[in-house]
Amino acid sequence: MSIAIEQGDTELTFTQFLNAPRELMFKVFSEPEHVKQWWGPQGWMMPVCTIDFRPGGTWLYCIRNAEGEEHWAKATYREIVFPARIVFTDNMVDAGGSPIEGFPPRRVSVTFDGVDGKTRLKVHVQLESAADLKKLVDMGFVRHFPETLQHLEQILNSVK
């Protein structure tokens, strides 16, 4: 599997071709029972995933590793266009859903382009500043997000 990663001054873009129609890709990004199966890097699971999938709705989730370390995040959906695009803002939060100081918020645009029965998945992550992008990179995001996309590819066959 190949994931192309582009980095600008304040943005990251991950592009991957997946052997699934874009309607299915949209489904695995929007339904909690599917998202729980693949979201998170290697060695992490998602014990909490609530999704109110509509513009203005939220997605609250927690990923946990085998040692019990947890990371919580809350996203607010900005735009949903079936089956082409999902746009949301994403923030690191505490277990109560309150933003954690010092973690930069991200605007994420996910696009699903159909290409001969397959999907070109693009995840574009926009930050407010180069300093915020550096924080995200230093946290390991560029290293770990491709692992999340690998999990997505692995579960697609079970969803079909």
Image (cartoon, rainbow, N blue to C red):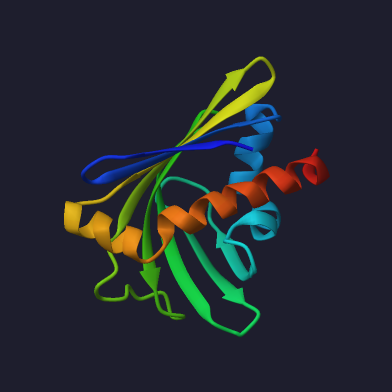
* Image-based side of 84 in relation to 45, left or right: left
Q: Quadrant of the N terminus?
A: top right
Residue 12 is drawn in which quadrant?
top left
Can residue 105 be seen from the camera position used here? yes
Residue 131 at x, y percent in the picture = 18, 58
Residue 74 is drawn in which quadrant?
bottom left
Q: How many numbered circles does the render carry?
A: 0
The vertical placement of 151 against 135, above or below, is: above
The vertical placement of 121 against 73, above or below, is: above
Q: Quadrant of the C terminus?
A: top right
Name the foreground residue: 24 vs 80: 24
* Image-based side of 153 in relation to 57, left or right: right
Residue in the image at 33% along x and 64% along y: 138
Residue in the image at 24% along x and 73% along y: 102
Residue 119 is drawn in which quadrant?
top right
The vertical placement of 95 against 122, above or below, is: below
Residue in the image at 59% along x and 75% along y: 64
Residue 122 at x, y percent in the picture = 47, 34
* Image-based side of 13 in relation to 23, left or right: left
The residue positioned farthest toward the bottom in the image shown: 67
Residue 83 at x, y percent in the picture = 57, 29
The vertical placement of 160 against 22, above or below, is: below
Residue 61 at x, y percent in the picture = 53, 67
